[in-house]
C-alpha cells in the first residue's frame, strides 16, 4: 500500500470527523434556546398562536435530534429516520391546521338588518350599547315588567343574533308570557350584530362579565338570571360561577368543547387535547355555582352530545332541575311547549324565593 493511499485515507477520516463534529447535539442547545424564547414571546404577546409555535418547535427539535443521533448509522437506519421525520412533519402540519382552522368553525357572526329595522319600531324593545375595553357591545332589552324587576340575561347560540331573537320574542305572546315580570336582555357577542371586539375564548369571558356588570349596576335590576342556549351555555355558566345570580337556565348545554371536538372526530384525548384551543370548560365553572340550574337536553340533539349534557349535570354542587327530552332536535328547544312551561315554573320559584 502506497504512502499516498494511506495519507489520503487519513485525510478522509479527518474530514469525516470534522463533518461529524458539525452535527454534534451540543449545537442544538442555542437552537432550542432560541425556539423557547420565540415560544415565550408568543405565549405572552400572541397567546392564540402559542400552541402552533409549540407544536412546530417540538417537532423541529425532535426531527433534528433524531437525525443528529443517527448521523453515522447505516443506510437502512437513515431511511427509517427520514420516513419518521416525514410522518412527524405531516402530523405537525395536521395539528397546526386543526389549531388554526377549527375555531373558525365555532362562530358564525351575523347581523339581521331587516329584523333590526323592524325591532326599532317595537315600543317595548330598547337598543343597548355597552362601552368596554374591547369596543362597544350592542344588543337589545325587552321591557317585559314594570318598575324594579329581575332580568333574564340571554346568551345565544353560535348562529343567533340579538335582533332576530328579540323580534321573535316580541311577537310571540306565549314566549313573552313565560318571562312575564322579567325584563329580557340579549347583547350580541363580539363581531355579531353591531358588537365590536375580537372573538375568542378570553374575549367571550370578558364580554360575559362586562354585560353582567353593566346590568347589575342598574338600580332598576333586582336580580339576574343567566340563560344560555347551545354555545351560549358556556358563557352563562361562566357568569354564574363568577357573579351573584338568582338562577340559571340552560338549553342544550355541553360539558366542555373537548366533547364537541370529539363528537366530530374522536381523537382529542391525552396530548391531542392540546389542539383544542377553545375549551369553554363549563364542567369546571359548574363547581362554583351555588344556585339550582334548570337544564334541558335532548337525546335527539344532533349538535350537542346528550352524554356531554349529562356529564355537566353531574358536576353541579346542587342537583339541577333536569329535563330530558326524547325527540327534540337542536333547533327545537325554543319551540317546545314543555320547555317554555318548565321555564315559567322555574322563574316563578325564583321570584318566590326570599
Image (cartoon, grey):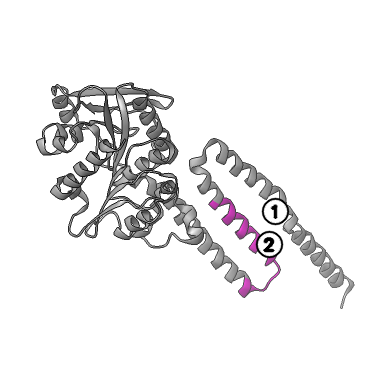
Point 48% across, 41% down: residue: 48
Element on which disc 2 rests: helix
Point 35% across, 32% down: residue: 190
Q: Position of residue 53 (x, y in %)?
A: 54, 47
Q: Position of residue 341 (x, y in %)?
A: 16, 45
Residue sticking out furthest to the right = 3
Where does the magenta region start and end? 55-77
Quadrant the C terminus occupies: top left
> Visible in this render: residue 220?
yes
Left or right for 39, reference 180: right
Q: Main secondary structure of the magenta part?
A: helix
* Residue labelled with disc 2: 68
Q: Give the total of numbered labels.
A: 2
Quadrant the N terminus occupies: bottom right
Foreground of the two, 47 or 127: 127
Element on which disc 1 rests: helix
Foreground of the two, 103 or 240: 240
Point 22% across, 22% down: residue: 126
The CA span between labels 1 and 2 is: 9 Å
Relative height, residue 250 to residue 21 (above, below): above
The label number, if any, that marks residue 28 in the structure image: 1
Q: Are marks 1 and 2 in contact (CB under 8 Å)?
A: yes
> Visible in this render: residue 193?
no
Is tag 1's residue or tag 2's residue first in the polypeptide sequence?
1
The quarter of the displayed image where residue 152 is located: top left
Q: Position of residue 138 (x, y in %)?
A: 30, 26
Foreground of the two, 186 or 29: 186
Relative height, residue 75 to residue 171 (above, below): below
Q: Is residue 59 magenta?
A: yes
Amino acid at each position: 500500500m502506497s504512502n499516498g493511499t494511506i495519507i489520503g485515507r487519513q485525510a478522509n477520516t479527518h474530514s469525516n470527523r470534522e463533518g461529524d463534529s458539525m452535527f454534534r447535539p451540543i449545537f442544538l442547545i442555542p437552537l432550542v434556546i432560541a425556539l423557547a424564547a420565540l415560544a415565550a414571546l408568543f405565549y405572552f404577546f400572541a397567546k392564540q398562536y402559542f400552541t402552533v409555535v409549540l407544536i412546530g418547535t417540538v417537532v423541529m427539535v425532535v426531527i433534528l435530534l433524531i437525525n443528529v443521533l443517527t448521523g453515522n448509522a447505516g443506510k437502512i437506519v437513515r431511511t427509517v429516520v427520514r420516513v419518521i421525520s416525514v410522518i412527524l412533519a405531516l402530523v405537525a402540519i395536521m395539528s397546526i391546521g386543526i389549531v388554526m382552522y377549527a375555531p373558525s368553525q365555532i362562530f358564525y357572526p351575523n347581523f339581521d338588518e331587516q329584523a333590526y329595522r323592524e325591532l326599532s319600531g317595537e315600543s317595548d324593545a330598547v337598543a343597548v350599547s355597552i362601552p368596554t375595553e374591547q369596543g362597544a357591545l350592542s344588543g337589545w332589552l325587552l321591557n317585559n315588567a314594570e318598575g324594579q324587576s329581575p332580568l333574564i340575561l340571554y346568551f345565544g347560540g353560535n348562529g343567533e343574533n340579538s335582533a332576530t331573537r328579540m323580534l321573535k320574542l316580541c311577537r310571540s305572546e306565549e314566549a313573552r308570557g313565560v318571562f312575564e315580570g322579567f325584563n329580557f336582555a340579549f347583547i350580541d357577542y363580539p363581531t355579531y350584530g353591531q358588537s365590536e371586539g375580537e372573538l375568542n375564548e378570553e374575549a367571550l369571558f370578558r364580554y360575559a362579565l362586562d354585560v353582567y356588570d353593566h346590568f347589575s349596576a342598574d338600580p332598576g335590576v333586582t336580580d339576574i338570571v343567566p340563560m344560555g342556549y347551545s354555545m351560549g351555555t358556556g358563557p352563562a355558566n361562566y357568569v354564574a360561577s363568577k357573579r351573584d345570580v338568582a338562577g340559571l337556565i340552560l338549553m342544550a348545554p355541553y360539558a366542555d368543547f373537548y366533547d364537541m371536538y370529539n363528537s366530530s372526530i374522536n381523537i382529542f384525548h391525552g396530548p391531542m387535547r392540546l389542539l383544542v384551543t377553545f375549551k369553554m370548560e363549563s364542567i369546571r365553572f359548574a363547581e362554583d355555582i351555588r344556585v339550582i340550574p334548570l337544564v334541558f337536553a335532548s337525546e335527539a340533539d344532533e349538535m350537542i352530545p346528550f352524554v356531554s349534557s349529562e356529564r355537566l349535570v353531574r358536576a353541579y354542587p346542587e342537583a339541577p332541575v333536569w329535563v330530558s327530552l326524547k325527540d327534540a332536535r337542536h333547533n327545537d328547544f325554543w319551540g317546545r311547549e314543555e320547555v317554555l312551561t318548565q321555564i315559567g315554573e322555574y322563574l316563578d320559584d325564583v321570584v318566590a324565593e326570599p
